[in-house]
């Protein structure tokens, strides 16, 4: 088990990403839950299978691909969710 440490002010994505990049080869998919790496795999599909085999859900985790530079901000769209209705 690999522990991902975060600054005292709380977890920040860029801090977690730097640690993942140091500990895993580029391209590897890594799932982090509550500061702990719970799975890693060569492909996203393999990572999903591994998480499911543990009886867990990715919705409760942060998934990072090692070596990938992510933008400082992003818009995430969800479809079919029970979110607010805009009529």
Image: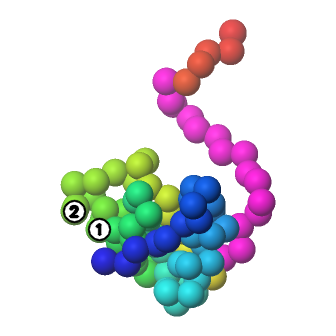
Q: Is residue 54 left or right of residue 64?
A: left
Q: Quadrant of the C terminus?
A: top right
Q: Nearer the viewer, residue 6 or 23?
A: 6
Q: Which residues are magenta?
A: 68-82
Residue labelled with disc 1: 50
Residue 45 on image: x %, y %? 40, 67
Question: What main secondary structure does the magenta stretch of the protein show?
Answer: loop
- Using the rendered image of the protein, determine whether residue 73 is visible from the camera's viewpoint: yes
Toward which corner of the image does residue 85 lie, by quadrant? top right
> Does the CB distance between marks 1 and 2 fall below 8 Å?
yes
Residues at marks 1 and 2, CA–CA distance in whole angstroms? 5 Å
Q: Quadrant of the N terminus?
A: bottom left
User: In the image, what residue occupies the spot 22% across and 55% down?
Assistant: 55
Place of residue 41 in the rendered image (x, y in percent of width and height, measured from the top left): 40, 78
Residue visible at 22% across and 61% down? 54
57 relative to 43, above or below: above
Q: Is residue 74 magenta?
A: yes
Asked if 25 appears above or below 65 in the picture, the reply is below
Looking at the rendered structure, which numbered label has been put on residue 53? Answer: 2
């Amino acid at each position: 088990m690999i522990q991902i440490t975060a600054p005292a002010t709380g977890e920040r994505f860029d801090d977690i990403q730097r640690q993942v990049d140091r500990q895993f080869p580029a391209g590897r998919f890594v799932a982090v839950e509550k500061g702990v790496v719970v799975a890693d795999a060569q492909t996203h599909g393999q990572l999903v299978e591994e998480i499911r085999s543990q009886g867990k859900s990715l919705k409760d985790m942060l998934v990072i691909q090692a070596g990938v530079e992510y933008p400082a901000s992003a818009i995430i769209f969800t479809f079919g969710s029970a979110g607010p209705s805009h009529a």
